[in-house]
Amino acid sequence: MNVLAVFCHPVRTSFCGALLDGVVRGLGEGGHAVQVADLYREGFQPAFRPEDFAQFDGAPMPADVRAEQARVEWAQALVFVFPVWWWTMPAMLKGWIDRVFSYGWAWQDPSYPNSLLGQRKALVLCTAGGDDRQFQKYGYREALRVQLDVGTWGYCGLTGATTRIFHGVDRSRPATDYAAYIEEARTLGRNLGREQAA
């Protein structure tokens, strides 16, 4: 299937970048066609602008938004790779979602059973400095689940979202110290969509 990998980290050589490489490698091994949207390196403008309000008037959206929407339209699955900062996604990715997942294209209305991005899988790979116990103790895992799986992917109709948080990542250590995590990302990429065929 066609897969768009949306990567959001300012340092391409970070552990997040190594996770991206791992999942893209696995996707290729699984026979998927992959495009990467590297938001920082491509210079995506995340700030919601006055012309973005065109969506609510049925007018054409800005060209940069339409270009991103075309990539999503090409894809049958979306993979997101990003660090958890302040218990959520980076502002760059939030801005991408704000602008690209627009009204009338990704979603329609508060009662959202027929949201417009349905039939696309979602795989979310996040890095976090905190450990799993910390996330459980303070409710961060549930907060992310509600925010992403329910409030974003589910609201737009993406199906079967899988979120994997890679805990305990220390940016002072090389990505090679996390070889097992990278291999897991590769496996998740390789197996994406296989459950549909089973």
Image: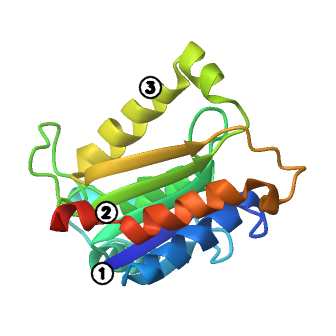
> Which secondary structure, mark 3?
helix
User: Is the residue marked by circle 3 packed among few (<14), some (14-19), or many (20+) residues within 10 Å?
Assistant: few
Image x and y of residue 180, in percent: 66, 56
The residue beneath circle 1 is 74
> Residue 54 has which mark?
2
Image x and y of residue 44, in percent: 58, 70
Tell me the amino acid under the disc marked 2.
Answer: Ala
- Residue 50 visible in the picture: no
Image x and y of residue 197, in percent: 17, 68
Tell me if residue 33 comes above or below residue 99 in the rendering: below
- Residue 3 visible in the picture: yes
Tell me if residue 140 comes above or below residue 37 in the rendering: above
Label 3 vs 2, first from the N-terminus:
2
Tell me if residue 195 comes above or below residue 168 in the rendering: below
Label 1 vs 3, first from the N-terminus:
1
Residue at 41% in and 57% down: 123
The residue beneath circle 3 is 142
How far apart marks 2 and 1 lie (CA) works out to: 23 Å
> Which secondary structure, mark 2?
helix
